[in-house]
Image: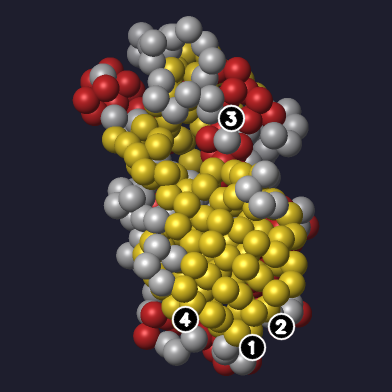
Amino acid sequence: MLYFIVNQTARTGKSSKVWEKVQTLLADVDIPYKFYMTEYENHATELAKMISQKDDMDICIIVVGGDGTMNEVINGIVDFERVRFGIIPAGSGNDFGRGLGIGKDVEENVKRIIRAYQSGRECYQSMDLGKVSWDSGTKSRFFGISSGVGMDAIVCKKALHSGMKTFLNKLHLGKMTYILLTIQTLFSMDTATVEVVYDKESRHFERLIFMAAMNLRAEGGGVPMAPKATPFDGRLSLSNASGIPKWRTFFCLPVLVAAKHERIKGFHVTDSTLAKVTISKPFVLHADGEYCGDVTEATFTCETNKLHMLL
C-alpha cells in the first residue's frame, strides 16, 4: 500500500495541480493507495505517526509537497525500519528532492516510485538523517537537508510567513525570496562568539554569521553551503562563516552561490558525525527551514542509514 501525504498549499497552492496529475497517473496502474490532505501546521507529522503505526509489513509514505512537509513527515515516523519514504517535489525550494537527484517531472517521479515499490526491498536505498537537539537535550528534531543557527536560520524563519515569498512564487521566482532575505538579514543581524566541539577537535569562532549542519549539499532554494556533502557517508558537513566584515560577506555571496567559498578566509567546512555548539547569545535555530527556537546551545548529530528511500 502507498500512503500519500499531500500539502495542497505548497508553492502557493500550485502543488494541487501536481497531485491531480499524480492521481491521473495512478489510475493507470493496479497499485492500492490512500491519500491524506494536510489541513494545518504539523498535521503532516500527526498523519505520518498514524500511518507508520499501521499493521502493514512494509509502509510506503509518499510526500507531495515541499521541504517543510518532508520535515514534518520524517518527524512523525515512529518506526523507521518499517517505513519506506518517497517524495514528489511540489514546493518552492525543493532542496531535498534536488539534493537526491529528483527533478520536478511528475510523471517520471511517479514511475520511479512505482518501480521501486514493485521491485521490493532490494531496491530501496538508505540515507542518513541529521538530528538537532537543544534545551539541554530535552528537545530534538530530525532534518533531511540541513539545520543551523544564525543568518540562514533567520532567513528561514522570515520566509515561513513572508508575503514576498507568496508574491514571488506567483511569478515563479520563489528562490529569489531567500536571496533577498539573506541580503536584508546580513546587514541587520547581530553576530556571536561560538565554541564548537567536533569529533576530533574543538574550534572557537568570533563574530559568527552562520553555522549550517548540512546533510545535503544545498539549502535555501539551492545555495550550496557544503558542496561535497552527501547523505550516504555517515557524516554531516558543518559549514560556517565568521570573523568577516558584513560588507565583505555581501560581496562573497556570489562566491557562496558558486560553491567556491571554501577558498575564502572566514569560511570553514568540517565533516563530522557530531557538532556541539555553544553560543554567546540567543541565535535562531532551524531544521529544514522550520523554526525551532532561539537557543544558546545545540548539538547536531548524524543518524546513519536512518531513512529508507524509494529511489
Counting residues from the start of the chain, the first of labels 3 and 2 encountered is 3
Q: CA distance from mark 3 to mark 1?
A: 39 Å
What kind of element bears circle 2? helix
Q: Residues within 10 Å of mark 2 (few under 14, many from 20)?
A: few
Location of residue 10 in the rendering, given as x and y in whole percent from the top left corner: 63, 41
Which residue lies under the disc numbered 4? Answer: 267
How far apart are the two marked residues, 4 and 1, measured between alpha carbons? 13 Å
Instruction: Examine the rendering and report whether any part of residue 180 can be seen.
Output: no
Q: Secondary structure at mark 3?
A: loop
Residue named by callout 2: 187
User: Of the residues shown, which amino acid type is indicated by label 2?
Assistant: Phe
Residue at numbered disc 1: 246
Q: Residue at x 49, y 41 (%)?
A: 89
Residue occupying image coordinates x 64% and y 79%? 193
CA distance for labels 4 and 3: 34 Å
N-terminal of the pair, mark 4 or mark 1, is 1
Q: Amino acid at mark 1?
A: Lys
**Are the residues at dot 2 and dot 1 in contact (C-beta closer than 8 Å)?**
yes
How packed mark 4 is, by other alpha carbons closer than 10 Å (few <14, some 14-19, many 20 or more), is many
The local secondary structure at tag 4 comes to strand
Left or right, 170 with respect to 198, comes to right
Which residue is the site of mark 3? 76
Mark 4 and mark 3 lie on one chain; the one further toward the N terminus is 3
Q: Position of residue 1 (x, y in %)?
A: 43, 12
Which tag is nearer the camera, tag 3 or tag 2?
A: 3
- Relative to 278, 115 lies left or right: left
Q: Is residue 233 positioned above or below 259 on the image?
A: above
Mark 1 Cα shell of 10 Å, populated few (<14), some (14-19), many (≥20): some
Residue occupying image coordinates x 46% and y 36%: 88
| Residue 111 x %, y % | 33, 28
> Dividing the picture into quarters, in which one does residue 37 lie?
top right
